[in-house]
Image: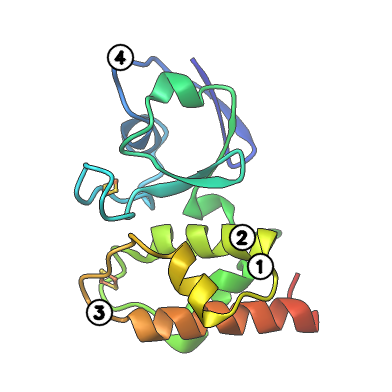
Amino acid sequence: MRFLVNGKTHEVEVAPGEILLWVLRDKIGLTGTKFGCGEGQCGACTVLLSGRPVRSCQVPAAGAAGQPVTTIEGLARDGRLHPVQAAFLRQEAFQCGYCTSGMILSAAALLQRKPDPDEREIRAALNGHICRCGVYGRIVKAVRSAARARRAGTVK
Ligand code: FES
Ligand code: FES
C-alpha cells in the first residue's frame, strides 16, 4: 500500500488488521510516534491524518493509505521548528518526553483551526492526552506561548 507521510510517499506491505502506528514506527522508521496504552486512551501515538489528530494505535493502516499523515518528524519546515515545538522547548514542557509528540501534534492542529484559544479550549483539545510526568501546567503555558508567537508573526 502507498502511504503519504510528511510529504513523502512510502510503498509498504501491510498485514491484515495492521495498525497505522506500527507502519509508521516499524516499516517507515518514524519512531517519534510513541506506543503507550495501545487502547486509544493515552494519546502518545497521536498523528495528524488529513490534518486531524487521530490515535494511530486505533487506525487500521489500510484506512490511512493514500491520505496525508503528519508525524512529529514532519512538523518542522525548512529547518525551523514548528511554533509549538519551539514553545515546548522554551517552556520546558516535558520531562521524559513520552507524551510530547502527541501533545504537540494535537496542539498544532488546535492552533491551525483556532489561532487564539483560551486555556479552557487548550485543555479541551489536549483532553485524553496523558502525561505521566504531570507537566500539564507547562504544556498549557507552551501552547499559549506558541499561539502568541504565531499571532505576533515572530514565527509562521
Ligand atoms: S498508544 Fe494509542 S492512545 Fe495510547
Ligand atoms: S513528559 Fe513524561 S509523560 Fe509527559
Give the number of the mark in front: 4 or 2. 4
Alpha carbon of mark 1 to alpha carbon of mark 2: how far?
A: 5 Å
Q: Which of marks 3 and 4 is nearer the N terminus?
A: 4
| Disc number lying in front (3 or 4) | 3
Residue drawn at x 64%, y 38% is 7
Q: Give the CA separation, mark 3 to mark 1.
A: 28 Å
Look at mark 2 in the image and give the residue it sits on. 76
Residue 20: x and y, percent? 38, 31
The 10 Å Cα crowd at callout 4, few under 14, some 14 to 19, many 20 or more, is: few
Residue 155 vertical placement versus 66 (above, below): below
Residue 29, compared with residue 65, is above or below; it is: below
Where residue 151 sits: x, y (%)?
76, 79
Residue 154 visible in this rendered orientation of the protein: no
Instruction: Tell me, yes or no, whether the two marked residues, 3 and 4, touch with CB atoms within 8 Å.
Output: no
Q: Which of marks 3 and 1 is in front?
A: 3
Q: Is mark 3 within 8 Å of ligand 2?
A: yes
Is label 4 in a helix, a strand or a loop?
Answer: loop
Residue topped by disc 4: 15
| Image-based side of 37 in relation to 21, left or right | left
Q: Do the residues labelled 1 and 2 touch (CB within 8 Å)?
A: yes
